[in-house]
Image (tube, helix red, strand yellow):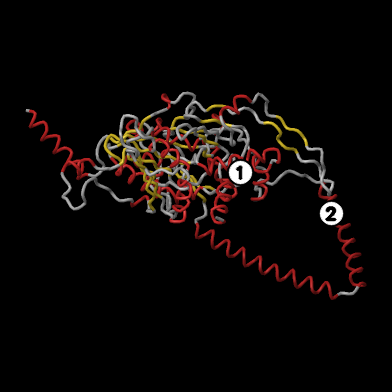
Amino acid sequence: DKDDKDKDKDKDDNEEKNTTAKNNGDEKMESENADTPDATTTTTTTTTSTEESNTNTDTNNNPPKTYLQKLAPAKTIPYIPYAYQLSVDRRTIRRNPALTNFHEWLKVQQNAGFITRQETVSMIPPVVLAPQSHHAVLDMCAAPGSKTSQLLEVISKIPNDDDSLEPTGFVVANDSDAKRAYMLVHQLRRLNSPAVFITACDGQFFPQIFKGNPNTIITDAEKAQEGLFDRVLCDVPCTGDGTARKNPGIWKRWLASNGHALHPLQVNIGVNGARLTKVGGYMCYSTCSLNPIENEAVVAEILRVTDGSLELVDKRGDMDGFVARSGWTSWKVMTEAQTRKEKRVQNKKRGDNMRKRKKELEKEKELKEQKGEKEQQDDIVKSDDDDKKEDDDDDEKSNKDTTPSSNPTEQEKKDDWIPIPPSWDEETLRKRAEARGLKVFDTIDDVTNHKHVMRSMFPPTKEEVAKFNLEKCMRCLPHDLDTGGFFIALFKKVKPVAERARRKAQELEQNECANDA
């Protein structure tokens, strides 16, 4: 119907420049920078990426537009199964007249559930989790559903050695926003799988679920187990500064305090995700940000709160061709020197001054219109004389010593900004940050009136660095894999998080040892 068509159009406009395809419901291929045809068509394409000019000019005599006429063959992504990548962005595919048929083909295949367009790096968390068809999987922040689709394709497989006609595992796709949950329904409906359950709940408070009949008493073994899910994905809300390559306008809105505001939410979702994971299961924490306040600081706090229940796992050795930098163990905490309250007051004063100045300009314009031509001519002559006098004064000043002042103004400081620092030492970088209105904190004791700066945002101690192994976190940089920026941390749960569950597990272990004796 019309509503579905509108939704499909909106979804297509917001899709990333990557493609995932699967053949007969079992195989899929993905690309990062563009949508790609099936594997047969791709392998027979031998042309290279070139640009040819369109010789037709429009009626306004504007210069001819340049369109991409030929595409390079899709290249495989070795660390993602059945994945392919093209070096063309989604806007080119949508707007280039030569690719109209290809674009229509993509939409038909996507709506039929045969392909899924997705960012390359955003497909890494499900690969790192490595779910099996019999697993119970939870996606805590699932919308818009691209990662959920990837997980569901694995879970929906029916085992060959089983007489059942339905999948043995399931995926719970959760999102805190009900409207985004409806987007999940629309996205996952095309897969037509019975193994998905969609919920709308705040990820911080997703409830603990126990197996069995709810009317029966929970046994000690169930209390000691803690967690229903074999795999948990926490792709948490973030500032998204890692997407600046495809969305450069994000820097216009970027503030250091944005990451501080999301930090406690990210920690709470991660800790709750650890609580919902089975002992022996895996939880993946990921963001499309490169800010350590949203990444390593959150991972360190999760490890600190869970107190030995989780261990970081490095999967880079199991992924051929995958390049990722190690996690950071040290970083600087900084925020805007002005507090939000001070900035609101300043903006209010600035707005009042602008309105006052606008009224003055309107009044001056009315007075000027009331003057006669003679007065206007007199004003012009007078202004010419004044300009001539100012020019003479400027010439006289230019002959004097032009040595700059030792106290430059704020505007002069901004004009003298050098993109590449003359030195990379800490003192130079600190001065550059302060020149841009940022305040650097060395310890939590330096924080006074910035309440959003928390203790957990600061780097771990030397003892914690040796204990946490933050270098096992994975940082994906755009220039390493021709992708966007991304952060991934994989945890393995080795014991219960809750103290009560730990005690029950210890009691059961002691009883088993006594019985064996």
The three-letter code of the residue at mark 2 reads Asp
Front residue of 44 and 236: 44
The three-letter code of the residue at mark 1 reads Pro
Q: Which residue is mark 1?
A: 248
Residue 374 relative to residue 163: left or right: right
Q: Which residue is mark 2?
A: 393
Residue 79 relative to residue 86: left or right: left
Q: Residues within 10 Å of mark 1 (few under 14, many from 20)?
A: few
Q: Quadrant of residue 349?
A: bottom right
Sequence-wise, the earlier of marks 2 and 1 is: 1
x and y percent of residue 482 in the render?
Answer: 57, 31
x and y percent of residue 34 in the render?
Answer: 59, 36
Front residue of 391 and 370: 370
**Alpha-carbon span between mark 2 and mark 1:** 44 Å
Under circle 2, the secondary element is helix
Callout 2 touching callout 1 (CB < 8 Å): no
Q: Is residue 296 visible?
A: no
Residue pictured at 46% horizontal, 53% vertical: 182
x and y percent of residue 473 in the render?
Answer: 41, 33
Disc sitting over residue 450 in the figure: none
Residue 425 relative to residue 279: left or right: right
Q: Residues within 10 Å of mark 2 (few under 14, many from 20)?
A: few
